[in-house]
């Protein structure tokens, strides 16, 4: 579904889309333009790729120097 209106993020008039980082059930209607939606997607990917703590129970891989 698309809707023409004012983008929630940048304030420009554009065809609106749903936010990728918010559950569809929590969005009553599309609210961001395509450019802002793409930025949100990029931020989601960057956050996913950031180093995260790994449980000590996860086996090490050969590139971590545990194997010889």
Image (cartoon, grey):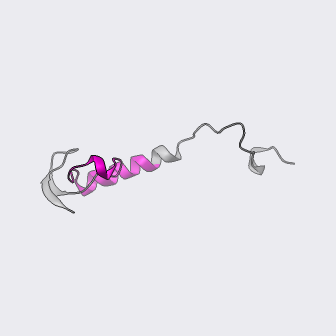
Q: Residue furthest front?
A: 25
- 22 relative to 9 in the view: left or right: right
Q: Residue furthest right?
A: 68
Queried whether the magenta region covers residue 27, the answer comes back as yes
x and y percentages locating residue 7 in the rendered image: 18, 49
Q: Return the residue nearer the eye: 29 or 54.
A: 29
Q: Position of residue 11 (x, y in %)?
A: 16, 45
| 28, above or below 57, in the image | below
Q: Residue at x 30, y 50 (%)?
A: 25
Q: Position of residue 2 (x, y in %)?
A: 19, 62
Q: Does residue 2 lie above or below 20 as drawn?
A: below
Span shown in magenta = 20-45
Q: Position of residue 26 (x, y in %)?
A: 28, 46
- In the image, 59: left or right of 53? right
- Who's the residue at 57% across and 40% down the image? 51
Q: Is residue 19 left or right of residue 44?
A: left
Furthest-bottom residue in this view: 1
The stretch drawn in magenta includes residue 11: no
Q: In which quadrant is the N terminus drawn?
A: bottom left
How many numbered discs, if any?
0
């Amino acid at each position: 579904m698309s809707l023409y209106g004012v983008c929630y993020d940048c304030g420009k008039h554009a065809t609106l889309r749903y936010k990728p980082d918010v559950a569809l059930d929590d969005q009553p209607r599309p609210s961001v333009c395509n450019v802002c939606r793409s930025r949100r997607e990029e931020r989601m990917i960057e956050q996913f790729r950031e180093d995260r703590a790994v449980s000590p129970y996860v086996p090490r891989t050969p590139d971590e120097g545990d194997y010889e």
